Image (cartoon, helix red, strand yellow):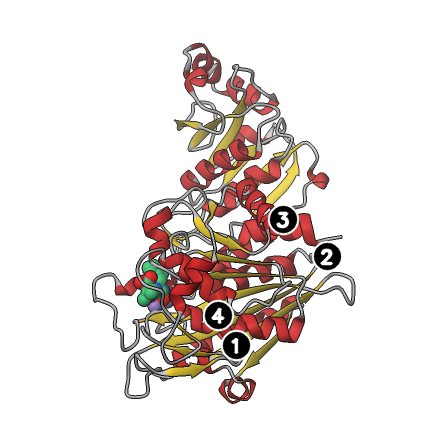
Amino acid sequence: MTDPVSLNVTDIDIDAIAGAGGRVAVIVTPDGRMDQGARRANRLTRGALARMIEGGVIAKMKPGEVTSLAWPAGMKAEALDVLCLARNAKADDLRRAGVTLGKIKGEAGLLVLAGSVRQPADLMLGLLLRAYEFNTHKTEEAKPNGAVTCMVSKPEAIDVQAVQAIAEGVFFTRDLVSEPANHLTTSEFAARIEAMKKLGLKVTVLEEPELKKLGMGALLSVGHGSASPSKVAIMQWQGGDKGTAPLALVGKGVVFDTGGISLKPAAGMEEMTMDMGGAGVVAGVMRTLALRKARANVVGIVGLVENMPSDRATRPGDVVTSMKGDTIEVINTDAEGRLVLADILWYAQEKFAPSAMIDLATLTGAVIIGLGHENAGVFSNDDALCNKFLKAAGAEGEGAWRLPLGEAYDKKLKSRIADMQNVGGRPAGSITAAQFLQRFVKEGTPWIHLDIAGVALIKEDSPYAPKGATGWGVMALNRLITDQFEG
Ligand code: BES
Ligand code: MN
Ligand code: ZN
């Protein structure tokens, strides 16, 4: 996988500033006060920073912004990056500054003098998250990723492991989402999950014969047309009290979505390599939890299938039977994600009786029409849990917006010949999809559905990621677990 930049956190040594190669970053407050590191850089450069401040450059900068001086005289560095940050800078500003540093960070490494920052962890996280590139399939040798040294006043007070764990979880998700479908087959996905056993996760992979035995006719009907076998992978992290019901995270893992017999148009179909994004986030969160040894019980369950047209593929009009026992008329084979989720949501409840259940899926194009690429669609049967999630997402800068559920939407799923059909028409397409899922959520299970079709992969840079896979949701869920599920 793509490893985050290696990060050293050390005590302040301002004598290192003069001779550091690569880039050096120092901090000036919005009202033009230099901290210790900045003062030294100012002296070395014979007052370059003081002139910046007097010239009004800092006054024009927003908190978290960076102004760079190239080849500063008196220093060995190739650039001096001046960060505008208040002493009590908010997490947002710190992350933004980190993101900017991550973006401009070169091959020669970076030294950050963060002695005056109270919460340098956020600065570091922003830096790590932005310094990402998916170059697995470029034959040109990758540029070396210069190491980062962050000098802070209390190195021992920073949980570097937790920062690294988040970045690693997010990168794991991004790599999975970016990976093309001929490489990330259902088997390869399962193998990457199984490799996380060495982090202390308990991993089980259910193969087709077992899925048949369990009665997962809905999930199996999606993978039927593909040469790749359908699988369900289960990741368990038991860091909490024995006997405490786990939180269940459930993910749609369609490694490629052609639409099946209801074939998608050619234009843009290549994007459907990301249709396993929900499963990718679940795997990423589980990785983070294991790496930081979270004190919570969490189970991640992903349905890994490929939606292909073939002589064996499910036809429009076919009726399939879900694990729950309800029958489903498949009107459109391109509404496949809900078929996968129906069975693994039910399985999650039958097998683990979770205290709460959150599913993630690149479920509908309609959510992109409604919310664009700024917010995931959030649906829930539990206001308290939902508000906690929205708060966690807000704190992590991951856009999330709640949409309604209701009887009237549910009625759209009525089928003439089966218990339900898998589509509810064009209006409110994301809501009728969520209603479909809710039919597989037991009364009394607090549940959130996150439709991440618009946020999993973005064609422009997003706050913490260069264009491409974002890893949206790993941080929000990690925080929700930290705040609500760890004792
Ligand atoms: N995987 C797609 C949804 C999607 C669209 C994800 C664009 C990311 C970007 C999903 O399986 C799908 O095809 N949904 C259909 C549902 C329709 C047939 C009811 C859709 O949104 O068009
Ligand atoms: Mn589809
Ligand atoms: Zn899909």
Confirm or reject: label 2 Cβ below 8 Å from ligand 1. Answer: no
Q: CA distance from mark 2 to mark 3?
A: 22 Å
* Residue in the foreground of this view, choosing between 430 and 251: 430
As drawn, the label of residue 232 is 1
**Among the two numbered marks 2 and 4 on one chain, the one whose residue lies closer to the N terminus:** 2
Choose mark 2 or mark 3, whichever is in front.
Answer: 3
- Residue depicted at x 78% and y 67%: 243
Q: Quadrant of residue 55?
A: top left
Choose mark 3 or mark 4, whichever is in front.
Answer: 3
- Residue depicted at x 51% and y 19%: 30
Tag 4: Cα neighbours inside 10 Å, few (<14), some, or many (≥20)? Answer: many
Q: CA distance from mark 1 to mark 3?
A: 30 Å
As drawn, the label of residue 341 is 4
Give the percent coordinates (x, y) of residue 1.
Answer: 48, 62
**Among the two numbered marks 3 and 4 on one chain, the one whose residue lies closer to the N terminus:** 4
Q: CA distance from mark 1 to mark 4?
A: 11 Å
Above or below 57: residue 254: below
As drawn, the label of residue 224 is none
Is there CB contact under 8 Å for labels 3 and 4?
no
